[in-house]
Structure formats: structure tokens, C-alpha cells
């Protein structure tokens, strides 16, 4: 299978998986992977993945985050590409035990190409470094959508659908022990629910076999500092689960 075909097939497989999680059983009546045929995901995971040569000549494989980023390329899969300045892929430790997922890049992130670097990001950094007492570089941070929605509106369903195969593969590549979903949008999107964040937070959920803790978004805390107490409770749960104890 050529690199392009395999990449397309893997995107399709992740998209079908996402739709299945959303309650859609079939793409069209009768359309499914032929029985006995390994999904492209399974096939790719047995090999190192296709080779991709990045613009600076580095050879990457789609089996790592660099390869995945190269595969996203100068993405035009949804209309956010028309207004974004940069794709904000994610940052941090590719072997992180803890992965944070936010909603989507804001203005500062769009300018710098990095997630959570604005005021909400500073608060997230404080939660990680002052609260959990670990370096921000030890964890992995990404968003549901990788491009800034104009005027900081919520991402539209088709934008989430276009980006979701990449989030799924990012999470599968990092394979964290715990995911923290930051805010209503990330929590509801990952868990495919409309339950309010006030009910989701503080309880353990599961996403693709990984323990997931929803909590309030740091931007919400900037507007409502009283909710810091709840976020700290949620973060302490996470630390306990990771065997980090009281620090
Ligand atoms: N808010 C988010 O959800 N993500 C970012 O990267 C920054 C702010």
C-alpha cells in the first residue's frame, strides 16, 4: 500500500471510529471493513509506519508525533485553515504519563504555534508546575481542534470531525496513563455527551482505554477564581492516580 493510500485509509478508519463513538453505526447501509481484512490501523501498527521526509530533510515515520505532524502538513481539511495563522499541533513529552486536552487555540496560541501560551495557558502552567510540582515539559498538551476558530467561537462539528483523526492518533501515540479534559467542550467532545461539566468533573471516565478526568477550563477559572478549589480537587485525584501523592 502506498504511503498516501495508507495515510488516507488510517484517517478514514479513525473517522469511522469517531462516528461510531458518536452513535453512527454505519457510513452507508452495508459499508464496513470487509470481514477478515485487518484495518489499516492494525496494519500500520505492525510496521514502523510510512517514511516521511520533513521540509528540513529529517526522515520521520507516521509512527511518531513528528510523522503525524508532517502528515497533517499545511492542512486545509476544514475552513479554519482560511483564518488561522498557524497550526497548533501540541507540545510536551511524547512519552508523557499525563495529557491535557483543551478546546482549540486562541489568539496567542495561533501567533506562537503552541498550545496554552496565553493567560489561560499561564494558569495551566501554574497548575502543573506550582500545583503538581512537575515541569510543564513533562506532560503533553494539545487541543480538540488544531486551528484557531475565528473570534474564539466554539469549533463547529465538521471542524471537530476533520481534526478528530489527528487527536485520536496523537493520544494513541503518547499513550498517557491519564487524560485531563479541560473544560466543557473538550470533555463533552471526547466523552460524546451533553452532560454539563459541573456533573462530569471530579469523576473518572474512560477514553480509548485511558482514564479521563474532566475539570474546568483555565479560562473559566480566570473569570471565576472561586472554582479553583474544584480544579485543585480534580488535580489531586489525578496525582493520586499517577502515584504522585501529596507534594
Ligand atoms: N484554550 C484552549 O482550549 N486551548 C489553548 O491552546 C489555549 C486556550
Image: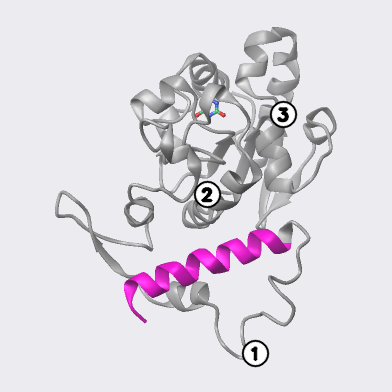
Q: Is residue 61 within the magenta segment?
A: no
Toward which corner of the image does residue 104 lie, by quadrant? Answer: top right
Q: Residue at x 74, y 78 (%)?
A: 29
Relative image position of residue 160 (x, y in whole percent): 59, 46
Per the image, the residue denoted by label 1 is: 35
Distance from disc 3 to disc 2, alpha carbons, whole Å, reads 27 Å
Viewer-nearest residue: 169 or 30: 30
Is the CB of mark 3 within 8 Å of ligand 1? no
Question: With respect to residue 71, does 212 lie above or below?
Answer: above
Relative image position of residue 74 (x, y in whole percent): 33, 47
Q: Residue at x 73, y 47 (%)?
A: 191
Mark 2, other Cα within 10 Å: few <14 / some 14–19 / many ≥20: many
Question: With respect to residue 236, does 13 lie above or below?
Answer: below
Q: Are marks 1 and 3 in contact (CB under 8 Å)?
A: no
In this picture, residue 78 sits left or right of residue 50 = right
Query: What is the quadrant of the C terminus in the image?
Result: top right
Residue 163 - label: 2
Viewer-nearest residue: 226 or 190: 190
Per the image, the residue denoted by label 3 is: 234
Is the CB of mark 2 within 8 Å of ligand 1? no
- The part of the chain drawn in magenta is 1-20
Relative image position of residue 44 (x, y in whole percent): 43, 74
Distance from disc 1 to disc 3, alpha carbons, whole Å, reads 43 Å
Distance from disc 1 to disc 2, alpha carbons, whole Å, reads 28 Å
Relative image position of residue 59 (x, y in whole percent): 21, 60
Q: Residue at x 47, y 56 (%)?
A: 173
Q: Residue furthest left?
A: 57
Viewer can see residue 90: no
Amino acid at each position: 500500500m502506498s504511503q498516501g493510500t495508507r495515510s488516507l485509509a488510517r484517517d478514514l478508519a479513525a473517522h469511522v471510529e469517531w462516528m461510531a463513538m458518536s452513535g453512527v453505526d454505519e457510513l452507508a447501509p452495508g459499508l464496513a471493513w470487509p470481514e477478515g481484512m485487518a484495518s489499516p490501523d492494525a496494519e500500520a501498527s505492525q510496521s514502523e509506519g510510512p517514511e516521511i521526509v520533513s521540509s528540513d530533510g529529517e526522515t520521520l515515520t507516521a509512527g511518531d508525533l513528528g510523522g503525524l505532524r508532517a502528515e497533517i502538513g499545511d492542512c486545509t481539511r476544514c475552513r479554519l485553515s482560511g483564518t488561522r495563522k498557524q497550526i497548533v499541533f501540541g507540545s510536551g513529552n511524547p512519552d508523557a504519563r499525563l495529557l491535557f486536552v483543551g478546546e482549540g487555540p486562541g489568539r496567542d496560541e495561533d501567533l506562537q504555534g503552541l498550545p496554552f501560551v496565553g493567560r489561560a495557558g499561564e494558569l495551566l502552567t501554574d497548575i502543573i508546575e506550582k500545583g503538581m510540582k512537575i515541569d510543564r515539559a513533562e506532560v503533553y498538551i494539545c487541543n480538540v481542534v488544531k486551528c484557531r476558530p475565528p473570534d474564539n467561537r466554539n469549533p463547529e462539528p465538521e471542524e471537530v470531525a476533520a481534526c478528530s483523526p489527528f487527536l485520536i492518533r496523537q493520544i494513541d501515540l503518547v499513550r498517557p496513563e491519564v487524560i485531563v479534559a479541560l473544560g466543557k467542550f473538550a470533555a463533552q467532545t471526547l466523552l460524546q455527551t451533553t452532560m454539563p461539566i459541573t456533573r462530569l468533573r471530579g469523576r473518572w471516565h474512560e477514553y480509548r482505554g485511558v482514564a479521563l478526568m474532566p475539570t474546568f477550563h483555565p479560562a473559566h477559572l480566570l473569570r471565576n477564581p472561586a472554582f479553583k478549589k474544584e480544579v485543585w480537587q480534580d488535580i489531586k485525584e489525578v496525582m493520586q492516580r499517577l502515584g504522585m501523592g501529596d507534594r
